[in-house]
Image (cartoon, rainbow, N blue to C red):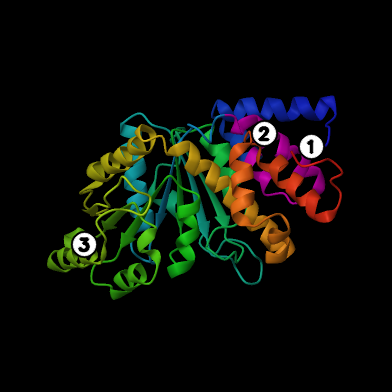
Amino acid sequence: MPSLSADSRRGVEELAASVQRGERSALAEALNLLDDRRDSARERSAKLVHLLQGNALDLGAHIIGMTGPPGVGKSSLGACLISEWRRRGMTVGVLAVDPSSPLSGGALLGDRLRLHSNSDDRGVFFRSLSSRGHYGGLSAEVWPMCQVMASAFDVVMIETVGVGQREIDISRMCDTTCFVAQPGSGDSIQSLKAGILEVPHILVVNKSDMGAIATRTASELAGALTSEHPDGAWRVPILSTSATQGKGISELADCLKVHFQNLLQNKLLKHRRRGYQAHWIVSRLREEFGSHGVERLGGEAAIAEQIQSETPDLYSQYDALRRQLTGCDTTNKS
């Protein structure tokens, strides 16, 4: 990693310490830094993530993904969950990933989840981020931003706009993925059957106040599921909630906690999070150098194995592999 001046280093270290204390202005500054694509900002971003990542891949916050079709009530349900977590004394960071404007590249929906929550609560922090058209529904900045937020909060929730199979990337970034289904919508069932069945760890039928139609949707989802999640050691539950009536929220929060504890007890969290980091790095390399570039490094599996065996350092690992492809790395590969 390029060396930094003493003044720059002190600035980044001070920023990292402030982020870990949960200072809102520092969090906003840190996330803005990660969103800045200038070379001067990239150097400071790499140092910041290095300082904050620490053991975050091994422990850190519970990273939760909320996905599902548009209009299903993810924002309202997320707001109810935030209130429940705050009642339990937990701090929450939220990344709301919106579709990009085709003209400006900015987020179209903005801080929609913020509108449903108490923005004066110092234990909750929101950040909206556009997807910038990135395939998979998540922009490249989400994973580094997760690392920053995980150092400051008990829970980091990523809310995405549902766009069918493109949402599968969320499962490669979150410890627990929650799919919210719309009662009476065949789209939810078809999308699960079409390939997203492997994604969610928890299925939620929101708007249970709709009665029989919600009950029927839950039964259809149960029929589409296999007995165990592909991750192993986890049977996918189907829960019913009503964000408008506040029903089933505590049960959902309990289920999310149980899944996270299951990952810890079965010692799966460390391996999975290092896998998330490997996926992020491989995706960035493929975007820049194509599949041929990934193959020159031995293929995705070999890169992932190498990354998982190293001490986690997001940008240093990425830059080292990138230098191999650009011919700038004169050191021997260990």
Q: Quadrant of the N terminus?
A: top right
Q: Residue at x 68, y 34 (%)?
A: 48
Instruction: Identify the residue under disc 1.
Output: 1
Q: Is residue 257 rendered to the left or right of residue 167?
A: left
| Residue 40 shown in magenta | yes
3 and 2 marks in contact (CB < 8 Å): no
Give left or right: position of 182 versus 168: left
> What's the residue type where badge 3 is placed?
Ala
Magenta stretch: dominant SS?
Answer: helix
Magenta-drawn segment = 30-54
The amino acid type found where label 1 is placed reads Met
* Residue 168: x %, y % from top left: 46, 61
Distance between mark 3 and mark 2 Cα atoms: 43 Å
Assign a secondary structure to mark 2: helix
Within 10 Å of disc 1 (Cα), the crowding (few <14, some 14-19, many 20+) is few
In this rendering, does residue 120 appear at all? Answer: no
Secondary structure, mark 1, is loop
Q: Where is residue 16 in the image (x, y as percent from the top left)?
A: 64, 29
Q: Exactly how many numbered labels are in the figure?
A: 3
Which residue appears at 52% of the width and 32% of the height?
152
Q: Mark 2 points at which residue?
A: 50
Q: Is residue 312 left or right of residue 13?
A: left
Q: Mark 3 points at which residue?
A: 222
Q: Earlier in the sequence, mark 2 or mark 1?
A: 1
